[in-house]
Amino acid sequence: MLSVFLFVSKNGSESWGGELKKRQDYCQNHDLDDPCNSEKLPGKSADLPIYTIMSILPRWSWPYLLVIPACIMLLQLRPLAAERTEIIYAFRNFQDPRPERMILVGEIQSKTKMPEVYQESSPFRGYDTRRDQITVKVVNRRGLKVGQKLYVIDKDPFHSRYRDGLIVGEIEVQSILHNSFYGWVLTGSGILLRVREGQFVARTLETENLERAYILKKRGDHYAQRGNIERAINSYHDALEADLTLPEANAALGDIYLGMSISSDGREVPVRALDVYRRAWDNRVNFRYRYEEFQFYRNYMEALYFTYDLRSKEASREENLAKYLDQIILVAQEALKLNNDAWVLTRLARAHYLRMVYFKLQASVEERASFDESFSRAGQILKQLIDAEYEDAELFRIAILFYGHVYDRNRNLDTEDAQELRAALATRIRQLYRRYTIYSAESIIDPDTIRVLNTIPEGN
């Protein structure tokens, strides 16, 4: 603080020699030792009393002695206020004397009605069944996530603190946003007839486990990277005990289970991996980082395809194998919202091709519509990737199989257009096969691609 005073003195006072003479006279008149003799430098006068420093400074600079330290104190205290923790003792009704300890989240700033769209045949047309939507200015960001249940507290106005309050509503968090002017703001919805602006929102103490769950998950990542799989699994389970809906822990645990299934000669269906992946999928809105969410989508698609491949080779096949392909399509669509990645597009094309083959011999109208949908979508994605000159062995494999299917559909047609189409398809398949052999090892070339190539006559 004194360095600030001396800085002002250096820039706003008279010459140092004249001010030094004044200080020496002051010391002699008051029978004091001279702490400011000529051997001391100007920057070494930090031991001067405040009245001596004020005598050095010009009068116009005196207000800064109070303003500057006050500003520094406010800047230091500001981040503490944004994360302060206030405990509330909330009561569910007047008859129950047992309160619940909760943590203050923020204050309600506005309350509106959510939009609602009715169908023509809805029995609720003409009735206002819209849910209420509120905006909350957050004072404590810790422990909050989308989909969480929060409680509206009606605090006693005669209490100066947040100690006691009555629970008058429940909200579900819809979004958590950060504004450079307001800070953290969340929106929630619910049936809030007794709720008004100015009331407070709180969360239960159970949400304190959220931060602990993240720490345990990171500990599991550390063990997994070092190859200590057993301790990694234990850490992930501890994280899920703290917060069962933590998507990062579920996704990481699924990665371990999937690797264990693949390493067991590739014959074990990853049931445990699909189970925890499903929990992560249901809570995907709670991912903190997009790159972790995107990586989860990739691994989840591989687990679903691995399961589909194993189930389709079993003697007692499942009745509805298409559910795995449908889920792959849903996961790929979510991944493409984060990144228009060619790897994801290739797996999406593979899912549509397998779905097309699955419904190829089905007779119902719905199954025929599913076949047409996947046939069209697979063709669009493959054309998009090939025109973009994306190089990947899996892309070439799926493209060969798909164009071979198109060739078979037009094999027996004698029209001029059909002959031109077969010639173009034959050329495209041979080009794709050459690129496929370049980008994949000879030992893992799919026999189905060789079969497609052998069915094309030499004349085409």
Image (cartoon, rainbow, N blue to C red):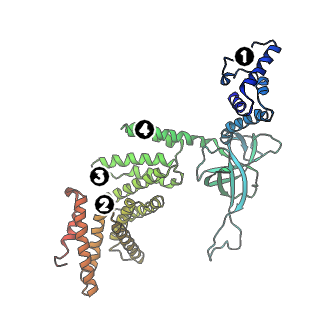
> Which residue is disc 1 drawn over?
35
* Element on which disc 3 rests: loop
Residue type for callout 4? His
Amino acid residing under circle 3:
Arg
C-alpha separation, residue under disc 1 versus residue under disc 3: 87 Å
Q: Earlier in the sequence, mark 3 or mark 2?
A: 3
Three-letter amino acid code at disc 2?
Answer: Asp
Task: Give percent across and percent down for residue 164.
Answer: 76, 41
**Residue at image mark 2:** 392
Asked if 411 appears above or below 176 in the picture, the reply is: below
Q: Nearer the viewer, residue 2 or 75?
A: 2
Residue 32 on image: x %, y %: 78, 13
Task: Give the labeled residue for mark 4.
Answer: 222
Q: Quadrant of the N terminus?
A: top right
Which circle, 3 or 4, is nearer the viewer? 4
Task: State which mark lies toward you, 1 or 3.
Answer: 1
The residue that mark 3 highlights is 267
The tag on residue 129 is none
- In three-dimensional space, the C-alpha distance between marks 4 and 1, rounded to whole angstroms, equals 59 Å
Q: Nearer the viewer, residue 220 or 180?
A: 180
Q: Secondary structure at mark 2?
A: loop
If you read the primary sequence from the N terminus, does the residue marked by circle 1 or circle 2 appear first? 1
Identify the mark nearer the N-term, 4 or 2.
4
- Cα distance in 3D space between marks 3 and 2: 26 Å
As shown in the figure, which amino acid type bears the numbered disc 1? Pro
Determine if residue 319 is in view. no
